[in-house]
Amino acid sequence: MNNNEIWESIKKAFKATLDKMDNHYMFYLDEMVTPKLITLLYWILLFGIITKGLGDIFLEGDFWRGLVWVIGGSLASRVACELVVILFRINENLDEINNKTGEGDSLSSTSFEKDYYKH
């Protein structure tokens, strides 16, 4: 894949994101932006870690430290970013469960319970 293909795929990804943006998207918290930013952060971290590891290997001559940076740093950044994404996925799943139980709520709750929890 050459630089032009990479650049076109980046522009296409951002164009799809920008097309979805409107006033409702910007001023209300209906859609999460952080999971998308975590992906960008992961790629930046991965680039920095691999650059650091290769610099240690070739510039400083310390092969093992560079290898630890490349392998260990890549895994650590992946795990850290995945843990943050997991929190958002848990939130989405809980929201789905809440929506599904809200539909069947009228069968299980009495009117007294509904009035009590409204206030």
Image (cartoon, rainbow, N blue to C red):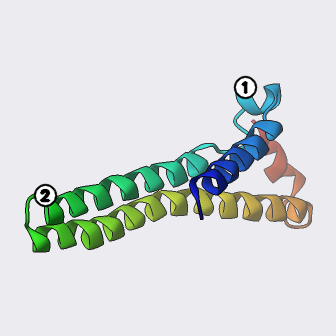
The type of residue carrying mark 2 is Leu
- Please report whichever mark, 1 or 2, sits nearer to the chain's N-terminal start: 1
Q: Could you say which disc has been placed on residue 104 in the image?
A: none
The x and y percentages for residue 57 are 16, 66
Query: Is 12 rendered above or below residue 95?
Result: above
| Quadrant assignment for the C terminus | top right
Q: Residue at x 72, y 57 (%)?
A: 95
Residue 61 is left or right of residue 100, and the answer is left
Q: Residue at x 55, y 46 (%)?
A: 37
* Res. 117 visible in picture: no
Name the residue type under label 1: Phe
**Looking at the rendering, in which quadrant would you find the N terminus?**
bottom right
Q: Which mark is residue 59?
A: 2
Q: Residue furthest left?
A: 61
Percent x, y of residue 44: 42, 50
Q: Which mark is residue 27?
A: 1
Q: Position of residue 80 (x, y in %)?
A: 38, 61
In the rendering, at what x and y percent does residue 60 appear? 8, 59
Classify mark 1: helix, strand or loop: helix
Residue displayed at 60% across by 49% down: 36
Mark 2, Cα crowd under 10 Å, few <14 / some 14-19 / many 20+, is few
Q: Which residue is painted at 47% across and 57% down in the image?
A: 84
* Few, some or many residues within 10 Å of mark 1 (<14, 14–19, 20+): few
